[in-house]
Image: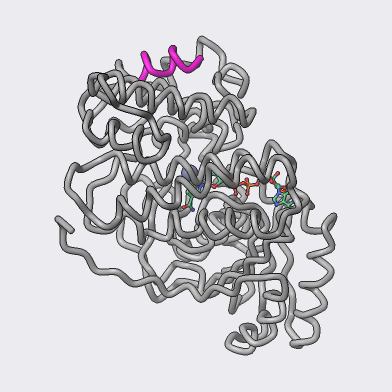
Amino acid sequence: MKYDFTYYNPTKIYFGKDSLNSLHDELKHYGKNIMLVYGGGSIKKIGLYDEVIKILKEESKTIFEYGGITPNPKYKEMLKGVKILEENNIDLILAVGGGSVIDCAKGMSVSKGYKDPFKSLWLDFEPINENNIVPVGAILTMVGTGSEFNGGSVITDEDRKIKMGRVFPSSVYPKFSILNPTYTYTLSEYQMLSGIFDTFSHLMEQYFSGDDDNTSDYLIEGLMRNLIVDTKKAIENPKDYEVRSNIMWTASLALNTLVGLGKTQDWEVHNIEHQLGAYTDCAHGMGLAAISIPYYKHIYKYGLDKFVRFAKNIWSIDDTNKTKDEVALEGIDALANYIKESKMVTHIKDLGATSDMLKDIAYSTVEGGGYKKVTHEEIYEILKEAF
Ligand code: NZQ
Ligand code: ZN
């Protein structure tokens, strides 16, 4: 492990078919005022809303309900939630939903007392006020982001046209997260696949950087291989409990910061997708799927040995009598086939991007990367390829 690290993840995970029962015990640790945050209504359709309300009432809690958080949660929605927190002395924010709901809840939890928290915390990166944090608990219904197990909060400011994430310290991680794979059965195939590719991308963002031999990359390879096998099975039988539970746990492990320890990371595919999202409001994982192939074709020569390793260890590419370049490209082609065969999105025009947006998206994206730092001009080229 090349770089020193400190690892601490305080989120308590309750995993499995009966995991919602643990909400009773968890609620006993918090005061009376619970803010229940959720999205556009899927939790009502799947019956989870009624179950949660029942438990909250049995524990004699006062419920402050805040529904309607949209995918790619918006700054204005977050501010509305902060107002509820400030006016009602909330003891716990209970986020029930996918990454958007949990991210928005975490965003609210750190924003009490700021005039323009997006600017102060997400753009100017000011330290958070630890004394003002309102604890968050999560019940996960959409798999992919890892938000249930980390300090990330990605917020879209529509006025500034910026979608920006910040990874907050461990005090902001959900105190507990309830993961019941059966809740994910009702996701559309599109959303399921979006989440699967988001997970795959988190693994690649942490893998494609650094050439040192470290445990993290071996862990990542195991998770990637499992995910590829389970993607096919989940498409064939979305209600296969073992498959959906594997996918759920893989997604959580992929971004609870464990598999990125001791090594450098990339994250430029995410930087580009976030700005694509700011302009199109597209499904996050599908944006990543459409950007990944042109991005990796653009940078692979700068990390050639790792792309060869990816081709051989993940896609079982035979390297006999081939150059490193050929093997690396066959690996990227195998990734492209996986995206295509799983019917994930391959062109950003299918996500609402128009050609006149591309330059603005490119020039508003943070320049970064792993093996190579890409410039705005290069991001523009990558977006044109992805179009
Ligand atoms: O709003 P509702 O009605 O709940 O519908 C949602 C939404 O339309 C639906 N859904 C959720 N659970 C369902 C369901 N539909 C049927 N049955 C269920 N059980 O799915 C749709 C998408 O949900 P959303 O929460 O937006 O998806 P996801 O979990 O992919 O979250 C995406 C957001 O997370 C950010 C993304 O940028 C994006 O804003 N990310 C957060 C990260 C983090 N915290 O670490 C890292 C990621 O890289 C990512 O950037
Ligand atoms: Zn992601």
Q: Residue at x 39, y 51 (%)?
A: 166
- Report the label total: 0
User: In the picture shown, does residue 327 fall above or below 249?
Assistant: above
* Colour scheme shown: one colour
Quarter residue 44 falls in: bottom right
Q: Is residue 385 magenta?
A: yes
User: In the picture shown, does residue 59 fall above or below 245?
Assistant: below
- List x then y, in percent, for residue 2: 14, 55
Q: Residue at x 25, y 19 (%)?
A: 321
Looking at this view, is 140 or 330 the one in front?
Answer: 330
Q: Is residue 334 left or right of residue 69?
A: left
- List x then y, in percent, for residue 213: 19, 50
Q: Residue at x 62, y 19 (%)?
A: 350
- List x then y, in percent, for residue 354: 56, 14
Quarter residue 94 falls in: bottom right
Query: In the rendered image, is residue 41 in sight?
Result: yes
Q: Residue at x 80, y 86 (%)?
A: 58
For the stretch drawn in magenta, what is the main secondary structure?
A: helix
Residue furthest to the front in view is 320
Q: Is residue 120 left or right of residue 11?
A: left
Q: Is residue 380 magenta?
A: yes
Looking at this view, is 42 or 208 the one in front?
Answer: 208
- List x then y, in percent, for residue 275: 46, 31
Quarter residue 272 falls in: top left
Query: In the rendered image, is residue 121 in sight?
Result: no
Looking at this view, is 221 or 144 the one in front?
Answer: 221
Looking at this view, is 280 or 253 the one in front?
Answer: 253
Which of the image's four quarters has the N terminus?
Answer: bottom left
Q: Which residues are magenta?
A: 379-387
